[in-house]
Image: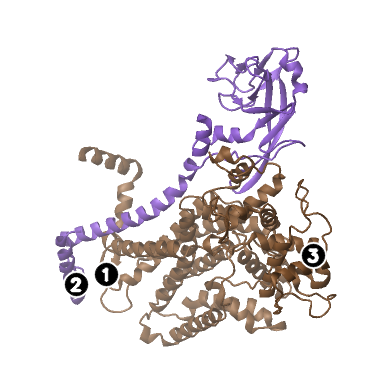
Amino acid sequence: MSAIFASIKRFLEERGGVVSAWRHFADEPTPIRRAWFFTLGSAALLAFVIQLATGALLALSYAPTPDHAHESVKVIETQLPAGSLVRGLHHWGASAMVLLVALHLVRTFGFGAYKKPRELNWLVGVVLLILVLGFGFTGYLLPWDQKAYWATVVGTKTPSAMPVIGAATEKMLAGGPSVGAYTLTRFYALHIVLLPLLTMLLIGIHLLLLRRHGHAGPTTGPDPREPFFPYQFARDALVGLLLVTALFWLAARHPAPLERLADPSDTSYSPRPEWYFLPLFQMLKLFKGPLEPIGTAVLPGLAIGLLALVPWLDRGPERRPGKRRGILLAGSVGGLAILVLLGLGAADQPKNAPPSALGPNAEPPPEPRILGGAVAFERRACVRCHGAEGNGGAAAPEGFALVGRSDTLSEDKLATHIREMSPPAKPVADVPGENDPDKDIPSLVVYARALQQGPVPLGRLSATIRLGGAVMDREECRTCHVVFGEGGRRGPELTRLSGKRDRPWLVGHFQEPKKFVPGSKMPSFRDLPEAELAAMSDYLLAIP
Amino acid sequence: MTGDGNRRGSDDIGDLRSEFQSGVSGPESPARRRFFTVLALAASAAMTGMLGSAMGILSLAPLRKRRMEGAGAGAGAGAGAGRLELGTLAAFAATRDGSAGPQEIVVTRTFADGYMTRRVKERVAVVADPRASAGLAVLSTTCSHLGCGVSWSAERKAFLCPCHGGVYAPDGTVLGGPPPRPLTRLPFVVEAGRLSLDLSQLAALSVRSTDACMKEEEA
């Protein structure tokens, strides 16, 4: 066996120089003192490799179009095995990468490791920091949820305040006059092709330069060295294991969020950037009106410029912190300013998390009777006196608003009021024998009661969910099924179907229940239009 | 890692301290080197294993995915639920009595395909089948060899595959070329004088792992 290995080793060495290349890599003299500080760079590199691997895997199932991006991410989260875990690793890996690159930079700054002959490597590092932030900016548009859309609208509008080049910059970022399909494909291509290639190239240069000049080592005292492998490699691997474990814990415990589908008409949404953009976001608030370019361009440009110039601002061979008070003070002031802005931004976060499109946190649709009642509300033209969604409205007489109204008629009186005041404009259903025009009154009573508790915002729901709930109300599914805790017990409770069933199954089952569940006693609903069956399926799948 | 290894580790830290004090790297201790090598490999293996298993599970997802041939929306007016109407029986009379050859029909099917709902056109062939009660059978036009689309040749009185020369008889049996099996017979129903593909049966045929469908097939 060992003879075979020896001959393979000899072959690889003779033909490719593989063994001596490994020796060259492994025997690099590495500092023993302060060794744990020097694991930050390799941890950042590991985070990048994790992003490459998880990102490539996510790209296999992701569709970069406004019509499908959100749904494809939802499929990754809810249907693909380990999809949520891998997306969680990618989400938290992004934050880890920014954090590790920043800590690596602070370490290099503190140790004065940017000094001659390592100035060029410092510059490469600064560019890498900008690229990492570029990954973050382009990455969070991709799920095409509310946060993605609105944060990108703000992000691409930010440079527009700059004089002369502002408008052109905005268009070049967005790929057109506004955030849309071309922004998504643009950001996707940047995120998965251009930025990774540039980053890999620069990391390669970063490592080559590190090897060319050797490790800078600790600032003072003796600097004993030992080979990179296995000593520093083992420390790097331990820190790496810690990083991977932390990412797994975060991904499992706090899965990557997915908010609702991007809604350009939603004016109430307040976009919040990721934590690493909060300092920039907070600074924009400090400069208003004509001063805005100071916050958007001048100060960030100045900060990056000063950072890049550090090796020339602090010249001379002295690396001991005690002898570099000036530059360390300047750096601390800059770092503190960023931390203060970060803290202010974090304190300014809204208390309530925006509604999620995933899992048990997804906002459940209103119960069928409310949606059926809302249809009856329109059919009976209740709007004339009570306003749209019972909010009174401009034309309604005072005191006719239902929302928040405290006087409660008994249910009988309410039903009588509906029957007398607003006969239906058209029959409830076209089904023969179901021509009772007042069949919808019980649901309308439930809807009116709900309005009295407070606004019932139905506009946020998709059209199919509204239709599906109304159809379920009309067909009286609650006679046999428990829906939202109420109803008959003849059939199974209608809850948590989204993991078990899909739309084709449900539609087929409505049409021919016995075919899908042998022995089923459920009547067939094959007379209903396909669109209503599909809408009912969507409604059922939305029930948590 | 054994207790033995740990003891070596603490000894090594002692060595390390003396190195700091002297300020020079002493000669390498083989025990210390072995300890760090084991540590390096174990930690690397652990993190590679964690990442590899998560990503392995996700990358193998296609093996688990069932074909989603769900109940599609009917193409034409009058198509019943879960049915895709192909035409009236009268329209196929000539095919049934043999005075005309098979008829190729293009149907549009809507189904859930991963993250989207897709409308696709599919071509099926209605052929004579004296053994069936309707006197007809519906064949898939997908060649059983490598999946190209076959089409009816009135001259040669056969279904021809353009890719590798497969030839099928009007009833779908193989006459020549590489196809290993006859053309697939699709489930259909005749209701009120109309011939329709039975999409729920079609789903049952392709989604073999769905238990409810399996029972349906056995029945």
Scheme of colours in the image: by chain
| Mark 2: secondary structure | helix
Answer yes or no: are tags 2 and 1 on the same subunit: no
Chain A color in figure: brown
Front residue (pair A419, A51) = A419
Does residue A261 sit above or below B173 in this rendering?
Answer: below
User: Which is in the foreground here, disc 1 or disc 3?
Assistant: 3
| Mark 3: secondary structure | helix
Q: Position of residue B11 (x, y in %)?
A: 15, 68
- Residue at coordinates 55% horizontally, 49% vertically from top-left? A61
Question: Residue under circle 3?
Answer: A419
Mark 1 surroundings within 10 Å by alpha-carbon count, few (fewer than 14), some (14 through 19), many (20 or more): many
Front residue (pair A79, A455) = A455
Side (left or right) of A80 relative to A236 = right
Amino acid type at image mark 1 = Ile
User: Which is in the foreground here, disc 2 or disc 3?
Assistant: 3
Mark 3 surroundings within 10 Å by alpha-carbon count, few (fewer than 14), some (14 through 19), many (20 or more): some
Does residue B147 sit above or below A516 in this rendering?
Answer: above
The numbered dot on residue B19 is: 2
The numbered dot on residue A32 is: 1
Answer yes or no: are tags 1 and 3 on the same subunit: yes
Q: Are marks 2 and 1 in contact (CB under 8 Å)?
A: yes
The numbered dot on residue A433 is: none
Q: Is residue A165 visible?
A: no
* Chain holding disc 2: B
